[in-house]
Amino acid sequence: MKVRSSLRSLRLAAGSKIVRRRGRTYVINKQNPRFKARQG
């Protein structure tokens, strides 16, 4: 998992979705799983 200072830059990657679960914000990307991230 790459470490990014903000999830905003990951959101721009192709195929990524931002999901909120249990108070945490996740970026999931089925096309390119290297863009997975969690915040909070």
Image (tube, rainbow, N blue to C red):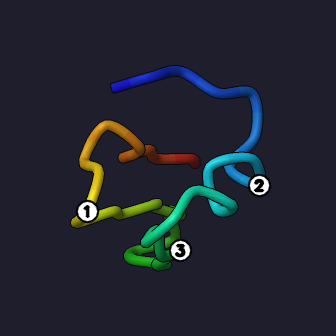
Tag shown at residue 31:
1
User: Residue 37: where, in percent of width, then height?
Assistant: 44, 44
Cα–Cα span, label 2 and label 1: 18 Å
- Residue at 35% x, 63% y is 28
Cα–Cα span, label 3 and label 1: 14 Å
Report crowding for label 1: few under 14, some 14 to 19, many 20 or more residues within 10 A (C-alpha).
Answer: few
- Residue at 53% x, 74% y is 18
Q: Which of marks 3 and 1 is in front?
A: 1
Q: Residue furthest top?
A: 3
12 relative to 38 in the view: left or right: right
Disc 2 + disc 1, Cβ < 8 Å: no
12 relative to 24 in the view: left or right: right
Q: Is mark 2 on a helix, strand or loop?
A: helix
- Residue at 64% x, 27% y is 4
15 shown above or below 1: below
Q: What residue type is labelled 3?
A: Ile
Sequence-wise, which precedes: disc 3 or disc 1? 3
Q: Is mark 3 on a helix, strand or loop?
A: strand
Placement of the N terminus among the 4 image quadrants: top left
Cα–Cα span, label 3 and label 2: 9 Å
Report crowding for label 3: few under 14, some 14 to 19, many 20 or more residues within 10 A (C-alpha).
Answer: some
Name the one closer to the observer, 16 or 6: 16
Sequence-wise, which precedes: disc 2 or disc 1? 2
Q: Which amino acid does label 2 sit on?
A: Arg
Report crowding for label 2: few under 14, some 14 to 19, many 20 or more residues within 10 A (C-alpha).
Answer: few
18 relative to 31 in the view: left or right: right
Q: Name the residue under label 2.
A: 8
Name the one closer to the observer, 8 or 24: 8
Tag shown at residue 18:
3
- Residue at 48% x, 76% y is 17
